[in-house]
Image (spheres, coloured by chain):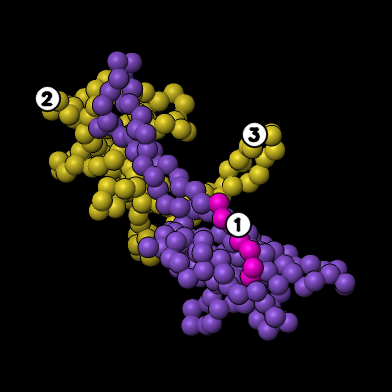
Chain colours: A yellow, B purple
């Protein structure tokens, strides 16, 4: 199951939460500015803001076609917001009431295994 | 060769003096709207998070500079070079933009034998544009 609330580039087949929710990590810490959450394997996407709440810009320019009114096109380079993706289990809690609306699947062991595999450094693997 | 004064735009490398020769710049400043919709945004009756208007993000602009080719330091405006630009609407009046870091995207000099040694450079700022005063 995928939840996505982006204005543009929303993932096909994704759903919305029935109410506005806070995304928490398993230890209860709040994760701000989440716009994407997948249940299995767990994945969340958030954008990063500066101290004043303004989204930070990503370090790389992106490219898009800008169509002028006369129909001609030209390449435009622009900055997009800085987005971070985490493969961590999450819980969605209703802003009003605090009930659990959704959570990442309990296949956490599997997810942890995947994460561990990704995080494993080559020397560790060689020792085994 | 004599140059027109840096009346509207000044270009320099760090620690170096002004790059002479530039006589016209055409700015086109733009700000990006960055979407701030997230799962905590209010939900509409259709069950979607209400899209934010977005907040204005960093400036990101490309502008072109016309110049007489500087016979001493032509490398200043070669592609891949990075310069600092201060662009003023009036000479000596802090109205405009100052201290922009810009990449040279394109440098196209006039190659006609009988032509005046002019050139046009396309510059793009690094994303942060400071307005003067």
**Which residue is rendered at x = 46% and y = 32% of the image?**
A8
Judging from the image, mark 2 belongs to the subunit labelled A
Compared with B108, A2 (above or below) is: above
Spatial CA span between label 1 and label 2: 55 Å
State the image coordinates of residue B86 (x, y, percent, origin top left): 49, 67
Q: Which residue is mark 1?
A: B26
* Element type at mark 3: loop
The verdict on a common chain for dots 2 and 3 is yes
The stretch of residues the image draws in magenta is B21-28
Few, some or many residues within 10 Å of mark 2 (<14, 14–19, 20+):
few
Along the line of sight, which residue is nearer the eye, A40 or A68? A68
* Element type at mark 1: strand
Of labels 2 and 3, earlier in sequence is 3
Judging from the image, mark 3 belongs to the subunit labelled A
The verdict on a common chain for dots 1 and 3 is no
Along the line of sight, which residue is nearer the eye, A114 or A54? A54
Q: Which residue is mark 3?
A: A69
Q: Which residue is mark 2?
A: A97
Compared with A108, B48 (above or below) is: above
**Which residue is rendered at x = 51% and y = 68% of the image?**
B91
Tag 1 near tag 3, CB within 8 Å? no
Tell us which disc is closer to us: 1 or 3.
1
Along the line of sight, which residue is nearer the eye, B56 or A15? B56
Spatial CA span between label 1 and label 3: 20 Å
């Amino acid at each position: 199951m995928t939840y996505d609330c982006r204005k543009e580039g929303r993932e096909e087949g994704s759903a919305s939460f029935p109410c506005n929710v806070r995304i928490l990590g398993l230890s209860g810490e709040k994760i701000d500015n989440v716009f994407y959450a997948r249940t299995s394997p767990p994945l969340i996407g958030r954008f990063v803001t500066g101290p004043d709440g303004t989204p930070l810009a990503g370090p790389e320019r992106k490219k898009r076609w800008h169509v002028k009114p006369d129909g001609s096109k030209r390449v435009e380079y622009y900055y997009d917001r800085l987005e971070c993706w985490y493969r961590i289990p999450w819980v969605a809690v209703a802003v009003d009431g605090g009930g659990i609306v959704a959570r990442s699947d309990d296949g956490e062991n599997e997810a942890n295994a995947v994460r561990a595999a990704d995080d494993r450094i080559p020397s560790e693997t060689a020792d085994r | 060769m004599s140059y027109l004064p840096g009346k509207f735009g000044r270009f320099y490398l760090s620690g170096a003096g002004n790059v002479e020769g530039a006589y016209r710049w055409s700015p086109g400043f733009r700000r990006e709207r960055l979407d701030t919709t997230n799962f905590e945004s209010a939900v509409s009756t259709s069950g979607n998070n209400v899209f934010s208007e977005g907040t204005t993000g960093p400036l990101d602009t490309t502008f072109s500079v016309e110049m007489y080719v500087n016979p001493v330091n032509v490398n200043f405006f070669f592609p891949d070079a990075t310069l600092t630009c201060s662009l003023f609407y009036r000479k000596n009046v802090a109205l405009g933009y100052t201290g922009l870091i810009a990449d040279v995207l394109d440098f196209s000099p006039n190659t006609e034998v009988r032509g005046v040694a002019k050139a046009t450079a396309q510059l793009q700022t690094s994303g942060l544009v400071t307005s003067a005063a």
